[in-house]
Image (cartoon, rainbow, N blue to C red):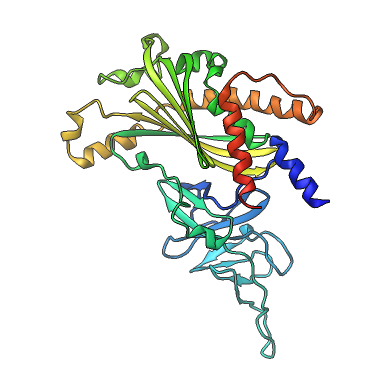
Amino acid sequence: MSSVSEASQIRDIRQLSINLDRWYVVARSSEVNTQPIGVTLWKQAIVLYRDRNEQIHALEDRCPHRLVKLSHGRAIDSELECAYHAWRFNARGECVAVPYLADNQKLPSCKIRHYPVQEQDGFIWLFPGNAQTKHHESVHPMGVPEWEHLNYIATVSVIHCQAHYSYLIENLMDMYHGHLHQDYQAWAEPSLKDIYEDSDRVDAHYNAQSYYKIDKIWSISQLFFPALRRLHPEPLNVSYIYPHWASTLGKDFKIYCLLCPVNEIETKAYLVHFTSLNAFWRLHKLPVWFRRFVKNSLFGSAQKLLDGLVKQDVLMIEEEQQAYLENPQRRGYELNRVIASVQRLMRNQVEKLK
């Protein structure tokens, strides 16, 4: 019976689970300070905390004593203390202290799950799958190399939608929906050129028109003043690099979407937008400290644009999810060949776990 159910879920993309043997983004580095925080990755409650050396750790967010959340507690040295009875757990999930333990009592042998976790490029990457698979050379965090690069200005927007992750990925890969964004629109007149597909990614290449061109010192003001924008042809490339997404619009813009699927009807993600300063060769000759000052000062310069895009996309994505919940048998009419490739990749990734 269960195998039939699993097969049905793989056929229905809107009930599809995730490939756990991949690295997912569960938080920004700046979100994890002295106070532990709770996150959820595909129905798994996880607590993140820093030890005294600022190292990130991830444990199951459930004290084995009374099953309350450890994220209510606090970090002490390299251990996590439960807020309820002050039981302590080390980074491996082992109970190492109970304050009221009697002399003739031993520490309980209970142990909670600990997760491989990495802090990289401004984000916390977590591996929820098989520990042996984690060591395979092809399985590693995708990374965001522009995060520290002095020639790129970053803006981050959080996507939190009540919808299955497939709706978000399809939205990001289908460039024909630019009409939705009106004043926030960055591209126009897309035309699908070709698709590349393999077992781990789908790349779609569009010809398009871009509203932005970052080639003069005042160019970044185009992000704030729509009247300064002028359409010009640029290649628009979008890639589903399972389980995340990346895009480039010409040479001036690069965007990532780092996913954290919560469950079948909820998805969290971080949309990271980079504006390139590569065209300003004189800037590259200035002292590193000054270039870093410029980079940090301009952080979030595209916030209004990015948040506007996210708000409009989330509205559509959640309406798609609601329509599915009301009538799961009803299907829409799809004309973009990219969507079939994306759905095939999602199914193939889940089938890898069987």
* Picture quadrant of residue 127: bottom right
Quarter of the figure with residue 8: top right
* Residue shown at the point (37%, 10%) measured from the top left: 230
Q: Position of residue 12 (x, y in %)?
A: 72, 36
Horizontally, residue 5 falls left or right of residue 96, namely right
Viewed as shown, does residue 31 lie left or right of 252? right
* Residue 297 pos. (x, y %): 33, 34
Percent position (x, y) of residue 248? 40, 28
13 with respect to 186 (left or right): right
Q: Who is closer to the viewer here, 250 or 195?
A: 195
Picture coordinates of residue 94, whole percent (x, y): 60, 73
From what the image shows, is residue 351 above or below residue 12? below
Q: Where is 181 relative to 238, above or below?
A: above
Report whether residue 108 is seen: yes
The residue located at (68%, 34%) in the rendering is: 162
Q: Is residue 15 visible?
A: no
Q: Residue at x 16, y 34 (%)?
A: 285
Compared to residue 111, the image places residue 200 above or below, namely above
